[in-house]
Amino acid sequence: MLGAPIACSARTLSLLTIALKSRWSCAILFRMQIVSSIAAMSRLAKKWQRAGTKIGFVPTMGYLHAGHMSLVREARKRVCQGGKVVVSIYVNPTQFSPTEDLSKYPRDLKRDLKLCRAEGADVIFTPTDAEIYPNRQNQKSEIGNRKSFSTYVVEEKLSQSMEGASRPTHFRGVTTVVAKLFNIVLPDVAVFGQKDFQQAAVIQRMVADLNFPLKIIIAPTTRERDGLAMSSRNKYLDAEQRAQAVILFHALQAAKAAVKTKSVSASRLKADLKEFLTAAPLGRLDYVEFFDPETLEPVAQVGQGTQMALAVFFGKTRLIDNARL
Amino acid sequence: MLGAPIACSARTLSLLTIALKSRWSCAILFRMQIVSSIAAMSRLAKKWQRAGTKIGFVPTMGYLHAGHMSLVREARKRVCQGGKVVVSIYVNPTQFSPTEDLSKYPRDLKRDLKLCRAEGADVIFTPTDAEIYPNRQNQKSEIGNRKSFSTYVVEEKLSQSMEGASRPTHFRGVTTVVAKLFNIVLPDVAVFGQKDFQQAAVIQRMVADLNFPLKIIIAPTTRERDGLAMSSRNKYLDAEQRAQAVILFHALQAAKAAVKTKSVSASRLKADLKEFLTAAPLGRLDYVEFFDPETLEPVAQVGQGTQMALAVFFGKTRLIDNARL
């Protein structure tokens, strides 16, 4: 546990030395709180805020992997010594459509807690559906329900293409739950992964548009040895699918190579990549797009600096990846 | 100025005595800041927050009257001594439809500042459209604009009837700008007027749903001597319209009297009130509704505790009022 790459200050190190000498339990030094109620999390955040303690925040859906852990390390780095790192674990129902994998989305809280503890997170926030969306029901049937949930945050431009086109209610769920979590956890800094490139762009736009008093950090994608982007959904893949799934990464590499010395028309490059993807016969392309990394507007001509993103189904599992070319 | 009804603490009073004895200028004691940039307001709010200073907030569209001043007093009361009261003055374009009175909405900043100063407000926040909605344009034409505004907060249930039905994009504009102002001003308490009953209900729902870390206070409607609810829009009325406008208040009184001893069917009471309103021939009824004060759901049977709201046009001027029966 102590070997985890935490950015230790001199003060932390000296405390550590004292602790080890006096045979305190390391668990006391790195005591991690698990908070489930919104009221308790909110009280804690307000207490820290009053004390001038910086708060770093990593919102997740759990089933954590090395990619999430890199976000926790980034949050720790940003809040420095004396700061607090909060990781939320919440599988947010509003970002899944009725046909998607909400009920079978992988969960393993015990393992998640162990990973977060090893990384030195201060608080794990695990709210319940009942508290996050009180009495959320079908819009028609909830009439007359005094406490039913009815407010959403919607981003109307960057959220329309790619993931938004394939999953029409997805980003509305993301922006709504992230706005809620920001108001509960009161972070100074929140860290999101580059793997969900469009999500990161939508969140940044929301924070700017609604003037959330915090800074968003986008941390690089963590990859398996062969290049596959880490994702909780990789768990769904069988051995053969897993072997072929690296095609997403290879497609990004191929596109990078194609535009290394000259720009190429997007339609031509798309056609070439479709051909390229046939090397993974278990994969079924959902989309491949070339776009401006800030506006997410498609470009006709692909060159260096263009952003590429793609989504590929393996069975029912949908994998995404992206890169700046 | 010193005669203004400020809830003075003992400490404030003793400071005041010292100040007067030492011939300090009262202007120093009650120095009011006028802040226009979002960054400056945000810095100030964060500074107060770090210092543990309570922040009371009154969002307005300016052209202030005694009703607004009662909200400022309420905010002062809530943050007690040492707290800060911020009044925002911003005519929010997104809550007006293209056919409404945005461009001719009354403005008088000089007079507003004088009133706020007299009431002991600490900061007047007067942001610009350019900062609140950077490059907001027609949804189609803004494509490609990197900094264009595209995130909205929408309440989908309480906002549908009455004002929401008469002014379809109104509440989306209200919730969006209020969410922004909350994130900039970081209030502990925000005060809204009971006159805009549905707005207050929608804002309270938004604060609960999105977990804004603040408390909403609804302050009672301030009325002219004859009973007309104070409103910046009363200015639009000519003498004859003004004389007849009191019919809204009288209609509320009549409905109260009608349900004093027995409940009455809503359709019957509506018919009676339409008849009653013909006493003001310059008025044209937009709606009169009887509903549950929490869910805003219409009731079939009107009794004590039912909420009533109505909107009446006088020329192009639309007046609203409401009461708990």
Image: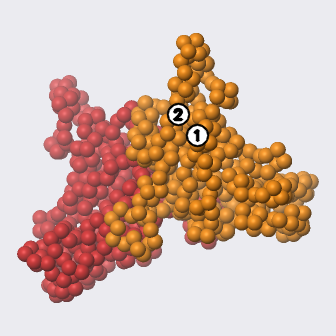
Chain colours: A red, B orange
Q: Residue at x 86, y 63 (%)?
A: B280
Residue A226 seen from this side: yes
In the displayed orientation, state which residue is furthest to the top.
Answer: B21
State the image coordinates of residue A165 (x, y, percent, origin top left): 38, 77
In the displayed orientation, state which residue is furthest to the right.
Answer: B261
State the image coordinates of residue A320 (x, y, percent, origin top left): 26, 72
Q: Which residue is mark 1?
A: B113
Secondary structure, mark 2, is: loop
Q: Residue at x 88, y 60 (%)?
A: B263
| Chain letter for the residue marked with disc 2 in the picture | B
Task: State left or right for residue A198 relative to residue A206.
Answer: left
Q: Which residue is mark 2?
A: B32
Task: State left or right for residue A65 relative to residue B160.
Answer: left
Q: Residue at x 83, y 65 (%)?
A: B282
State the image coordinates of residue B119 (x, y, percent, origin top left): 63, 34
| Chain letter for the residue marked with disc 1 in the picture | B
In the displayed orientation, state which residue is furthest to the left.
Answer: A261
Q: Quadrant of residue B98?
A: bottom right
Q: Amino acid at mark 2?
A: Met
State the image coordinates of residue A53 (x, y, percent, origin top left): 35, 36
Q: Nearer the viewer, residue A9 or A309?
A: A309
Q: Residue at x 84, y 69 (%)?
A: B267
